[in-house]
Amino acid sequence: MRKHPLVQMLVIGAIAVAIGIPIALIIPWFPSEGAIQAGNVRTLYDVLLIASVPIFVLVETVVLFSVWKFRMRPGEEEKDGPPIHGHTRLEVLWTALPAVLIVSLCTYAYTVLRSNEASKRGAMTVNVTERQFAFEFSYPQANGKTVVSPVLYMAKGQPVVFRIRSLDVIHSFFVPNFSEKIDAVPGITTTLRVTPTRLGTYPAECTELCGAGHSLMRSEVRVVTPSAFQTWLAAQPANAAPPIGVPPPAAAQPGVPGAAAPAAGAASTGAGSSASGSSSAAGKTLFAGSAGCSSCHTLAAAGATGTVGPNLDVRLRSDCQSAASKRIRGSSLNQCIFTAITKPYAYLPPGYRAGIMPPNFAQTLTSTQIQSLVSFLTGVAK
Ligand code: HEC
Ligand SMILES: [Cu+2]
């Protein structure tokens, strides 16, 4: 006995849905779940999948079934299809149902967003400053000192509110395991809230094409126990120099990291309060910390192991002695290093290209800070 085509179609569709939903839910769409917010987002995705699979199956079943059932048979080349002219009830149905579905899914997604963005009691502020092509994390509430780190440390279970700024172009801040992401936009401060729930080391990345070094713009998140976090924080040096991206007090305008631009002029007054003049010790702190040099350069004296730019232990002296470098960057080691920092592409050491070393240290660092870096590096490279 033959069944009506519609019944056949429904049976096939029901089987496909029954197989499709478990498959869709089993596929590991996300990396391991590292935060409360990630849990909410993943539940949302599961609901979206459960709603999407039947619709996908419905559409595909009707398409494939029609192709098979109503295909042209030999001898039907001249025939026309039956003159069907609309079906009001069906049309009302296929407009109303998707509308209801979309409104309810949007409402649910909105509540997830609201709950992920809700401020948590006792949240700790971490400033995220981004620039071509590095992240910098600073902890302004570290028992009276400001701690700056190229790696993000977080305590398990401790809610954190990130204040994200950019010094140059649009970047973004994305930790896949937290399922949270937001842009870093020059001139404004964006906010993201995360409560980590699982110990581990996760990648942080920039997901906004921000220049030639974009693919190198990565950092690391270490979620540790609260006591390990306190130990780490206590062991960090207090950073006298303002971390990159936090405007100097004189230019303090909330959310305007670019206010650090007139640094050259402000240097004589602003920097004087914390450090009297440049010093090679301050240069070392800058190199290893807030200036971000260590993310790209290897330099034993600063404990730096970056591999993006030249290994300064090995190359700095010889590169500065080459005839071409002497002509362009100046003949003394001092001048060479100063030019290499302030005009990085004027002379490129063999094997390196322009566009990777940030070109704007002359704006983002004060002249005192640059002098400190120069005297530190000159001392090391002698
Ligand atoms: C994003 C990666 C990156 C960062 C951050 C970075 N550099 Fe560089 N640096 C490079 C690259 C690549 C070169 C080689 C090409 C060039 O000179 O532009 C270089 C070259 C240099 C040179 C010349 C080396 C030689 O052998 O001639 C010096 C000196 C230097 N950097 C110092 C610094 C200092 C100081 C900082 C921090 C204030 C810093 N760099 C931050 C990537 C970086
Ligand atoms: Cu970026």
Image (tube, helix red, strand yellow):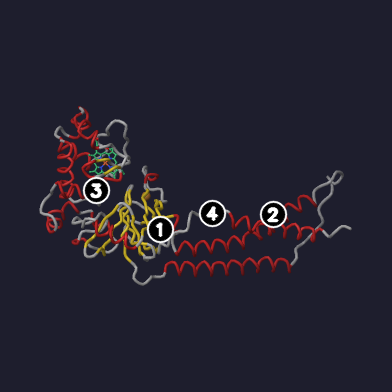
Name the mark nearer the viewer: 2 or 3.
Answer: 3
Q: Amino acid at mark 4?
A: Trp
Residue nearest the observer in this picture, 200 or 240: 200
Pointer 1 or 4: first along the chain? 4
Cα distance, mark 3 to mark 1?
26 Å
Q: Quadrant of residue 24?
A: bottom right
Pointer 4 or 2: first along the chain? 4
Q: Residue at x 12, y 59 (%)?
A: 273
Question: Is residue 102 shown left or right of residue 206?
Answer: right
Name above or below for residue 92 compared with residue 288: below
Pointer 4 or 3: first along the chain? 4
Q: Amino acid at mark 2?
A: Glu
Cα distance, mark 4 to mark 3?
37 Å
**Residue that badge 3 annotates:** 288
Residue nearest the observer in this picture, 199 or 109: 199
**Residue that badge 4 annotates:** 29
Name the mark nearer the viewer: 1 or 4.
Answer: 1
Q: Residue at x 24, y 48 (%)?
A: 288
> x, y (%) of residue 153?
33, 57
